[in-house]
Every structure is written in C-alpha cells, then in structure tokens.
Amino acid sequence: MARKVKIDNAILKKLQRVEKTRSVDSRIKRKYILIVCEGEKTEPNYFKSLKENLPKGVLEVCEFRIMGTGYNTRSLVRKAMNLRTEWEEETRRTVDKLWIVFDRDSFTPASFNMAVNTCIANGPAVDCAWSNEAFELWYLLHFHYYNTGISRADYQGMIENNFRGKGLAGYSYRKNSTEMHALLQMHGNQATAIRNAKRLERTYV
C-alpha cells in the first residue's frame, strides 16, 4: 500500500489561493459599450434592434446602453461624455467604448472637426460615426452605392423603392420604425452596406 504523503497546511492554503486566482482570471471580462446618438428615435431604434439580433453569446460578455439625446453640434459631444461618466458612476465600471453618432450636416465645419478631434484626443475608447446628410443613407447603402447628394426629402421615396424592389409591395417607410434593422437583414445586405460605406468614405478622405 502506497504511503500517503502529508502536505503542510501552509502549502495547501497557498495552492488554494493560486487555484482561486486562476478561476477568477479565467472569466471573460464583461465589456461596457455606450452608444450616444444625436437623434432621439431613428438611430437609437436601429441600434436597439441591432442589439436584439446580435449572435448568441455576445450579450453575455457585452453590455450595451443606447441613448438618443436630441443634442447636436458641440453640445452632443459634451452630453456624450457626461453620460459616460454617469454610467460609470452608476455601475462602478469603466465604459470600454463610447460611440457618438450624428449627422454631419447638423454641424458647422468647425464644430464637425472639433467633434472628431475630441474623439481622437480621448484615445481608442471614444469614437464617432456620422452620415451625410442623414442616418438613412446607411439604410440605402444596404442596396446600392450612392455618392451623390441626397436631400432629406428624397430618402423616404428611395428607401421605399428599394424595399418594394425586393418584394415588399406597398412598403411605406416610417422614420422612427423599430423594425428597420430586421427589415434590412431580411431584404438588404449588410456586407454590401459596409463595403459601400468604406468606398464612400475613401472618396471623401
């Protein structure tokens, strides 16, 4: 019969502490992502719908807070920074990523540059996304590439025509719809939208 080896209690406790540390370190750190939008409904509704359709498991490691402000120009950037601070104080957690989303035409050239430079100055934890002239341009890019000026008045008809061309006869666009992300997933092409957006960005850089 093998002799049982007795391990000193101090060594046992040390091994237990090491094992406990390994267990804690092996857990995935939850990430906190805040999206602050200029618009109060259109953009937040889209991102909330996108959140609900994220792949299984993403929401287990990422927590999203999506907020529409009604602010624009310099006040939007200040508001976004304040909302980040408020959330951090509420959760006692660091916000890993702050996105500020706005329409470029709502800013004067000087204010637009200030918004972008403020994001850059805050490092990789802060970023911004913008459309010109309106957020609906992102919807259209799911169908085709557009590089000409589109007025706000034209977006509704163009979105309706694209959806009707995909078989949604009689489709009528509602600006603050909570279904846009789901509809675009079904009838548009997100990979096409990303490719078109990158191509459009390159033409203006």
Image (cartoon, rainbow, N blue to C red):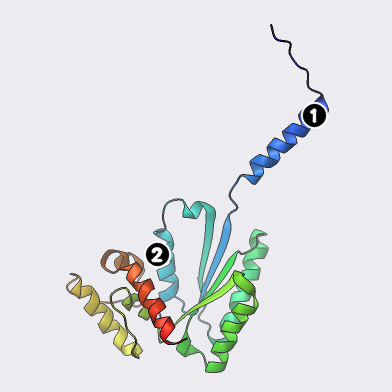
Above or below for 105 versus 55: below
Specify whether residue 75 is in view: no
Tell which circle, 2 or 1, labels the residue nearer the N-terminal end: 1
Dot 1 corresponds to which residue? 11
Q: Mark 1 belongs to which amino acid? A: Ile
Q: Quadrant of residue 117?
A: bottom right
Residue drawn at x 50%, y 81% as measured from the top left: 70
* The label number, if any, that marks residue 150 in the structure image: none
Distance between the Cα atoms at labels 2 and 1? 53 Å
* The label number, if any, that marks residue 49 in the structure image: 2
Q: Quadrant of residue 18?
A: top right
Horizontal side, residue 100 vs residue 170: left or right: right
**Residue nearer the viewer, 104 or 25:** 25
* Image coords of residue 65 (percent x, y): 53, 65
**Residue nearer the viewer, 106 or 58:** 58
| Circles 2, 1 touching at the beta carbon (< 8 Å) | no
Residue drawn at x 41%, y 59% as measured from the top left: 52
* Image coords of residue 126 (percent x, y): 59, 73
